């Protein structure tokens, strides 16, 4: 008979709803630019800026990184500015370490940064065929033929 029991719970609106609507952008993939040639002022003269070899290696690491396929043009521009900070750091300006650390974290440079950004390596399962990190046989392969002893108790259990 209808009407018995407590009334259904009313659906309550979320109180912590975002006050500003989300903006959806059209995805635009951008190719990595080369480190640019430019001049800087030194002692009143304009001289060619020389990228440290370490910064060139660092830049190539980003170009080849899995994250790069998700970078748009503004990401590459921000990373170019970060490359200049990286170069200055490797030229001895250690006061830039904090800014460099913050900037590379935005791109998922470390395991903790990738975890914070909720990045995972999709090919990891494919590479080990689901066998885990060791590359050895899976638990199903190791223990798949084990069966319960008659009487329901595993051998050695109390």
Image: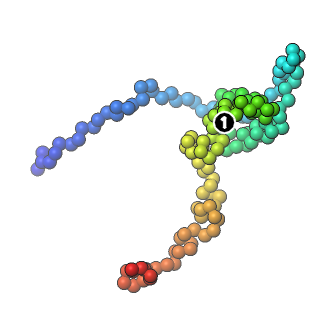
The residue sitting at the bottom extreme is 150
Task: Name the residue nearer the viewer: 63 or 100.
Answer: 100
Return the x and y of residue 158 as percentages of the image width and height: 39, 80
105 left or right, relative to 89: left
14 left or right, relative to 66: left
Task: Name the residue nearer the viewer: 48 or 124.
Answer: 48
Return the x and y of residue 142 as percentages of the image width and height: 56, 74
Return the x and y of residue 101 as percentages of the image width and height: 66, 36
Residue in the picture at 44% in, 82% down: 155
Residue at numbered disc 1: 101
Residue in the picture at 66% in, 31% down: 99
Residue in the picture at 68% in, 39% down: 68
Badge 1 marks a residue whose secondary structure is helix
Residue 55 position (above or below residue 142) = above
How many discs mark residues in the rendered view? 1
Query: Is residue 33 shown to the viewer in this render?
Result: no
Q: Residues within 10 Å of mark 1 (few under 14, many from 20)?
A: some
Q: Quadrant of residue 17?
A: top left
Q: In which quarter of the image is residue 12?
A: top left
Q: Quadrant of residue 10?
A: top left
């Amino acid at each position: 008979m209808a009407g018995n029991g407590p009334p259904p719970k009313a659906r309550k609106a979320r109180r912590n709803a975002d006050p500003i609507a989300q903006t959806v952008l059209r995805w635009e993939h951008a190719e990595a630019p080369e480190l640019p040639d430019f001049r800087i002022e030194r002692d009143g003269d304009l001289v060619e800026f020389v990228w440290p070899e370490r910064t060139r290696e660092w830049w190539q690491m980003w170009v080849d990184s899995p994250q790069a396929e998700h970078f748009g043009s503004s990401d590459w521009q921000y990373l170019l500015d970060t490359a200049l900070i990286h170069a200055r750091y490797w030229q001895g300006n250690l006061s830039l370490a904090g800014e460099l650390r913050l900037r590379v974290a935005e791109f998922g440079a470390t395991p903790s940064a990738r975890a914070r950004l909720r990045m995972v390596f999709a090919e990891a399962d494919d590479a080990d065929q689901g066998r885990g990190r060791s590359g050895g046989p899976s638990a199903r392969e190791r223990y798949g033929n084990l069966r319960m002893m008659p009487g329901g108790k595993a051998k050695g259990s109390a």
